[in-house]
Image: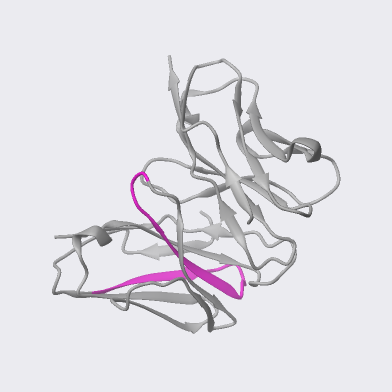
Amino acid sequence: ETGVTQTPRHLVMGMTNKKSLKCEQHLGHNAMYWYKQSAKKPLELMFVYNFKEQTENNSVPSRFSPECPNSSHLFLHLHTLQPEDSALYLCASSRRRTASGNTIYFGEGSWLTVV
Amino acid sequence: AQSVTQPDIHITVSEGASLELRCNYSYGATPYLFWYVQSPGQGLQLLLKYFSGDTLVQGIKGFEAEFKRSQSSFNLRKPSVHWSDAAEYFCAVGMNTGNQFYFGTGTSLTVIP
């Protein structure tokens, strides 16, 4: 139990579907992150939220749409995805984005398969 | 530019043998250093971290790591590996402003009986 919970753990969706990934953290943190982990590739930082405000978007295609209604919850809305978007999507949180000695804690991940 | 290098893509060790996973970083100041472990199908779990003080850091599951400033390294060690240690290990570096965090490409560990 890491304090960061992701649902669903597995998701299969068609290219025309709309689905969402959900993340909730119980650590009292103020920064939340989405990472993408594809096979044989380094971890890719997608989005960062700090105190509910999006502070980073690392050139992520618009078919991925994040939402952070409060510091404890983070969503990744998915629509019109491509098969190459199939990957493990990891949510993470930390005390805050610019804290000295920031430690990032990860959830278990959501396995996404686009068919 | 800042970077993290894990030179070994894959390592195989026998159960009970010692383990050392290498991590080198490139950063002008003293960074914050982390090791994470990822079991198959799981997220990343924090093993240990170094912020300051004693350069030998103890972590969970019997792991330790040593920060060597002169070598820009933060190698992970375990004196006796267990079959359950088979996983992917990631070294990470955080900048002292906290707003940048870099991961290495990972080292896959196989443990043979």
Please state the total of marks drawn on the protein image: 0
Give the x, y percent position of residue B79: 65, 21
Please tell me whether residue A70 is drawn above or below residue A41 in the rendered image: below
Q: Residue at x 67, y 48 (%)?
A: B26
Q: To which quarter of the image does residue A20 belong?
A: bottom left
Quadrant showing the C terminus of chain B: top left
Q: Residue at x 13, y 74 (%)?
A: A16
Give the x, y percent position of residue A106: 51, 58
Quadrant showing the N terminus of chain B: bottom right
Please tell me whether residue B89 is drawn above or below residue B21 in the rendered image: below
Please tell me whether residue A50 is drawn above or below residue B73 in the rendered image: below
Q: Residue at x 65, y 59 (%)?
A: A103
Is A24 one of the magenta-colored residues? Answer: yes
Please tell me whether residue A34 is drawn above or below residue B65 in the rendered image: below
What scheme was used to colour the molecule? one colour
Q: To which quarter of the image does residue B108 belong?
A: top left
**B111 left or right, relative to B30:** left
In the image, the segment drawn in magenta is A19-40
Q: To which quarter of the image does residue A62 belong?
A: bottom left
Q: Which residue is drawn at 39% across and 48% down?
A: A41
Residue sticking out furthest to the right: B53
